[in-house]
Amino acid sequence: MIPIEELYANKIFLNAVLPLLKVIVEKKENLSKKFNNKNVLIQISAKDSDGKVGTHYKVEDGLWTVVKGITPSPDIELEFKSIPALNNFFRGKSKKLPKIRGFKNIGLLISTFKALITMSNLLGATSPPKDTQEKDLLAQLYFYLLSSGISQLNKAGHPEVSKWVKRSPDRVYAWVIEGKPELSAYIRIKAGKSKASRGIYKRSKPFFTMHFDSVDSALGILLETDNLIESTISEKLVMEGAPEFGAQLGEYMTLVGSYAK
């Protein structure tokens, strides 16, 4: 039997981490041009007692769509022998390659691997990139990962997160960087339901916002190279809302990170 912690981690990898591949391909011209005008189904999966779990990408004329779940006939597939095998590969704890299908599309297969390596290098960074665009992309990826990851833990029935969401009235928690609205993300929770979204929440002011004064300040906290208290005192990070909710949100951010590492 697969430990419940591995199942929680798998939900995060399949539904919060792997969807970031689309963002990376779209942002990086050296990757996106490899898929220009291409039509292909790409799947990343793991065998399970009930069959398979996975995420796939529908690429139509070079445009990517992320689809949760399995497609029966992908053109390219990376199939791991088990859920823990997939988790450990994306944690960087295993170098054992999955079963690979799709050598007839060798060019796109290689490009898929390049995109996955790029994602791994970005999310595995321990210090901020030097390039400004890379910094922006990394902060964006983290915000998307954290908002989606918390929501996925709720949907997977994680006891702490589900209890928090179930008891909550309609509230929005947001991550924002001054002057960079395109990097923002938020999660809306209410009576057991949660939904992660990208961009600025515009219907009303969020219940709680982690507001960073710059990308560097955000990455300092996200990569744990800056001290949270010092950043708050110096107003590199302003918690817009009651401090106790900031501490609570921070706990769930750390929880997501623990499953993804």
Image (cartoon, helix red, strand yellow):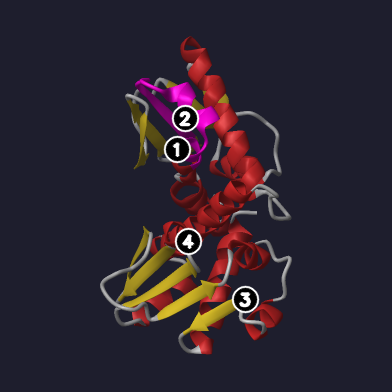
**Residue 105 point in image, percent of width and height:** 47, 14
Mark 4 lies on a secondary structure that is loop
Q: Mark 1 points at which residue?
A: 26
Which quadrant would the C terminus be assigned to in this image?
Answer: bottom right
What whole-number distance in Å separates the C-alpha atoms at marks 4 and 3?
15 Å
**Residue 232 point in image, percent of width and height:** 63, 82
Residue mark closest to the camera, 4 vs 1: 4
Amino acid at the residue labelled 4: Lys
Amino acid at the residue labelled 2: Ser
Mark 2 lies on a secondary structure that is helix
Asked if residue 88 shows in the view, the reply is no
What whole-number distance in Å separates the C-alpha atoms at marks 3 and 2?
34 Å
3 or 1: tag closer to the N-terminus: 1
How crowded pointer 1 is (Cα within 10 Å; few <14, some 14-19, many 20+) is rated as: some
Amino acid at the residue labelled 1: Glu
Q: Name the residue under label 4.
A: 180
Residue mark closest to the camera, 3 vs 2: 3
For the residue pair 167 and 242, the one nearer the viewer reads as 242
3 or 2: tag closer to the N-terminus: 2
Residues under numbered marks 2 and 1 in contact, where contact means CB atoms less than 8 Å apart: yes
What whole-number distance in Å separates the C-alpha atoms at marks 3 and 1?
30 Å
Residues under numbered marks 4 and 3 in contact, where contact means CB atoms less than 8 Å apart: no
Residue lying at 47% horizontally and 10% vertically, measured from the top left: 104
Amino acid at the residue labelled 3: Lys
Residue lying at 36% horizontally and 20% vertically, measured from the top left: 37
What whole-number distance in Å separates the C-alpha atoms at marks 4 and 2?
23 Å
Highlighted magenta segment, given as a residue range: 24-45
Residues under numbered marks 3 and 2 in contact, where contact means CB atoms less than 8 Å apart: no
Q: Mark 3 points at which residue?
A: 236
2 or 1: tag closer to the N-terminus: 1
Mark 1 lies on a secondary structure that is helix
How crowded pointer 4 is (Cα within 10 Å; few <14, some 14-19, many 20+) is rated as: some
